[in-house]
Amino acid sequence: MPSATPSPAWDGRRPTTGTEPGATALLGWLTDPDAPRLCLVTGAPGSGKTALLGWLAAHGPRSGRTRRRPARVLVPLAGQSALGTAWAVADRLGVVAGTPGDLVGALATSEARPTGRAVLLLTDLHAAAEPDALARLVTELAEVGRVRLVVEARDDTPALAALRAGPRVAVVDLDGGPGPLDPVEEPARPLPDLSDPAAVCAADPLLVTTAYVTGSAPAGVPGTLDGPEPSGETADGHGGLRTAWMRAGQSLCRAQPPADRALVLLAALGDGADPRLRPTLAELAAGAPWRLRWARHRGDLTPPWPGPVTVLGAAGGPLEGTLLVGDRTGTVRLLREADAGSVGRLAHAVPGRITALAPAPDGTVLILDDRGRLHTVRGTASRPPYLERLTEAVSATLARHPGTALAAIGGSVVVGDRLGSVHAFGLTGLHQAASHSGRVTAVAAVDSATPFVCSGGADGTVRLWTPGRDPVPEPLADRRSPVVSLHAAETPHGPLVAVAWGDGLVELHRPEGGPKLSFRPGPPVRAVAVTGSGSLLVGTDESLLCLAAKK
């Protein structure tokens, strides 16, 4: 079994007395590109293991060095389940994960790597609620190229012994000399009543997660790492609260006021939940900036869940008040904006997956398929000949140069491409802007007093542009996560822009000025839209939500 090798001396920021040899070994491991990706810090109680990892998390580079170091993320494991740990790590690394397996997959395949390479510092494996499950998660994470891990535990931990038996593991043993005492373990905190929404929203969310997973509560049932129980929400022993918590857990475990947590939990509540929960959670969420209009989840019956969401559209003109909801099979369902009730399906013959929907004011719906080609589904009203010619010209262009994003207003069709440019095809000609570094992931067009185009990219920026003018130099938004969906509309409150990023965040922006609002449903967001009334639609693989900003 290899051991971590010492590194050259560092500057004056020293670790706690008694752990210097271990600190030297850890820094040597960090700077050795050929070292194993997993390093175990072992020792008896009081040898300074936790203090050493806390020092490593805060330890900066040598003075005068400007090279950016990998992020060091400290995650305590005491009392943690594997699921709660996965949510905490995913949140810190800018990805979304519903399960431990999702975390491994997300880190291995995520398009944007907002933190670059990361070092996970996991303390107190011996005090975890599910040490064996966490050891399995650590082993899988150690195979991901962008992650290195330091795991701390006492020598007598069975899960640690399983990790030490791995073929590629470095070990730092602090039993070679006296060290400072580790922090005194806190006494176990009392569990909240997991059937009481007020108690759940106010309690430590990691404690709640562990209790729901392990069933360690008076009304508990055996837990699962795979998400909501399939047998119905009343079977979860908590009136549907546990099912909702499992659905939105990564968002619920973030630091936030109880009112915001109540809103997320309310939005994740299915129609089979105890009917007393909804008004109680709505009252608890009174201080949140959003009001939930409605939510539809997998398994809902009244009205039925419309299916997984991959694209969204909010129609005007003849389809005013109608939502277009596309799934991964290419089916586009028509729903009432008021309550998500079904009003039929879009009659189209587009093979394969749909990547964008663009309802035009005359009732025509333009569709972009996964090959970047344009398709037209005509509405009941006849189209003017000039619009037909425009659409045919755009379709011919995309047959040669596939698009990655699509929008339409009045007499214009807007397309984004994989090189970062946005193209506005209009009756007066073609206007173009090089707006992004990398692929354009979404575009929207707003037919307001001053029409404008809004675009989002894999570079994490959202930019505004009026065709025929120079793009606005400063982005409307800029984050270290790719934009996955974007939509804009003129509303009674002025133009609104909804943006969803790859790390699960949704924001509502007011380009003409005003507060920015944010919301995290928990699962990965696939699509967002703004309705003509100003409501925000959020679509995921399991849910479709409609929120209204409070005045």
Image (tube, rainbow, N blue to C red):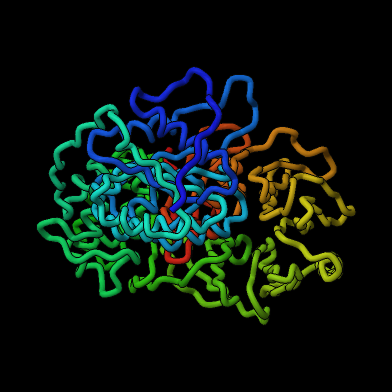
- In the image, is 31 to the left or to the right of 14? right
Report whether residue 292 is seen: yes
Which quadrant does the C terminus fall into?
Answer: top left
- In the image, is 495 to the left or to the right of 343? right
Give the x, y percent position of residue 396: 86, 70
Give the x, y percent position of residue 439: 72, 54
Q: Which one is in front, 82 or 241?
A: 82
In the displayed structure, would residue 453 be above or below residue 551?
below
Name, please, the residue furthest toward the right: 429
Measuring 29% from the left and 28% from the top, which residue is drawn there?
A: 179
- In the image, is 425 to the left or to the right of 216? right
Q: Which one is in front, 13 or 277?
A: 13
- The quadrant where residue 512 appears: top right
In the displayed structure, would residue 50 be above or below residue 228?
above
- The quadrant where residue 417 appears: bottom right
Q: Which one is in front, 365 or 112?
A: 112
Give the x, y percent position of residue 306: 45, 71
Measuring 26% from the left and 72% from the top, which residue is drawn there?
A: 232
Q: Which one is in front, 154 or 106?
A: 154
Report whether residue 486 is seen: no
In the displayed structure, would residue 173 be above or below residue 542?
above
Measuring 43% from the left and 53% from the top, which residue is drawn there?
A: 1
